[in-house]
């Protein structure tokens, strides 16, 4: 099996610069993105998956996220924070997927927003269209359940929650908090069956304020569920 390839950082800056200058935008409409092979590095510790694109589904982010995570499940967090990897995948291995999933007008801003990971900050890692898939599974999979991706599916019921809302809060750094939120949401589907976006934002905002005075890393997921039970009457009234 081949080793995973990534772009050199200097090459990414060059590609970004061209897009910012409205150059080569038509490249993103072609069947294949032609790259300079001299601008590629090898990651000797990471194997390049075979036929990853075939496992992805442009119409189902949950399926794509699990498929992507499964082939890269051995990535260390620092490796999964490397923009060189995700930018390579978006332009090479998963270029056809990106074209199908993000088939809007290829303006300069649209390409920069969808094909490039802007930084390795928590919010950007979770909002990026490829790294966000991996990180969403990473923070939501629960090895204690029969189906370890059961709560991940809850997370992906609302794309905005998975890729935007959760990543803006420090809660996303605490797996037990994330699992507590998702388990509470799963057990209270009837409460969240309407105005889900507004209620999910209230949940994360509420726990974020709670975490302002509490050491979140010390608590189990059940603690967060108990805290959210106190919010339940307000959620029902919305």
Image (spheres, grey):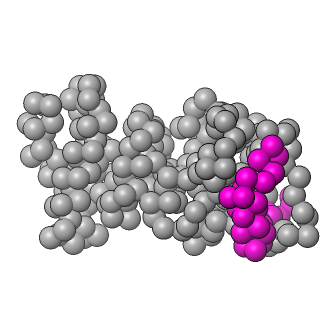
* Residue 14 on the magenta segment: yes
Going by the image, does 141 lie left or right of 81?
left
Q: The magenta stretch spans which residues? A: 1-27
Q: Residue furthest front?
A: 21
Task: Note whether 111 is above or below 191 in the view shown.
Answer: below
Number of numbered tags placed on the structure image? 0
Q: Could you tell me which residue is drawn at 33 percent across and 59 percent down?
A: 169
Q: Could you tell me which residue is drawn at 21 percent across and 56 percent down?
A: 207
Going by the image, does 57 lie left or right of 140?
right
Q: Is residue 191 visible?
A: yes
Task: Note whether 8 is above or below 87 in the view shown.
Answer: below
| Residue 170, percent from left and from top | 33, 64
Q: Quadrant of residue 14?
A: bottom right
Going by the image, does 84 lie left or right of 1?
left
| Residue 69, percent from left and from top | 60, 51
Between 154 and 166, the one lying in front of the other is 166
User: In the picture, which quadrant includes the N terminus?
Assistant: bottom right
Q: Could you tell me which residue is drawn at 24 percent across and 38 percent down?
A: 199
User: In the picture, which quadrant includes the C terminus?
Assistant: top left
| Residue 144, percent from left and from top | 41, 51
Between 196 and 182, the one lying in front of the other is 196
* Residue 163 on the magenta segment: no
Q: Is residue 144 visible?
A: no
Q: Could you tell me which residue is drawn at 42 percent across and 34 percent down?
A: 157
Between 46 and 167, the one lying in front of the other is 167
| Residue 202, percent from left and from top | 21, 45
Task: Note whether 56 is above or below 205 in the view shown.
Answer: above
């Amino acid at each position: 099996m081949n080793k995973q390839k990534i772009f050199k950082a200097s090459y990414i800056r060059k590609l970004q610069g061209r897009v910012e200058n409205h150059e080569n935008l038509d490249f993103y409409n072609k069947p294949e993105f032609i790259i300079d092979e001299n601008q590629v590095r090898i990651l000797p510790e990471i194997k390049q998956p075979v036929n990853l694109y075939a496992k992805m589904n442009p119409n189902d982010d949950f399926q794509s996220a699990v498929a992507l995570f499964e082939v890269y499940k051995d990535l260390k967090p620092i490796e999964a924070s490397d923009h060189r990897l995700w930018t390579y995948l978006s332009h090479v291995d998963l270029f056809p997927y990106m074209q199908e999933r993000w088939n809007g007008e290829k303006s300069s801003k649209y390409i920069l927003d969808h094909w490039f990971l802007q930084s390795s900050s928590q919010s950007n890692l979770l909002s990026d269209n490829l790294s966000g898939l991996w990180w969403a599974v990473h923070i939501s999979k629960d090895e204690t359940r029969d189906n370890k991706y059961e709560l991940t599916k809850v997370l992906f019921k609302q794309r905005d929650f998975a890729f935007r809302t959760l990543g803006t809060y420090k809660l996303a750094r605490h797996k037990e908090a994330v699992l507590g939120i998702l388990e509470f949401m799963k057990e209270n589907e009837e409460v969240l069956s309407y105005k889900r976006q507004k209620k999910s934002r209230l949940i994360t905002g509420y726990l974020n304020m709670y975490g302002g005075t509490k050491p979140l890393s010390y608590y189990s997921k059940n603690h967060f569920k108990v805290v959210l039970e106190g919010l339940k009457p307000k959620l029902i009234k919305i």
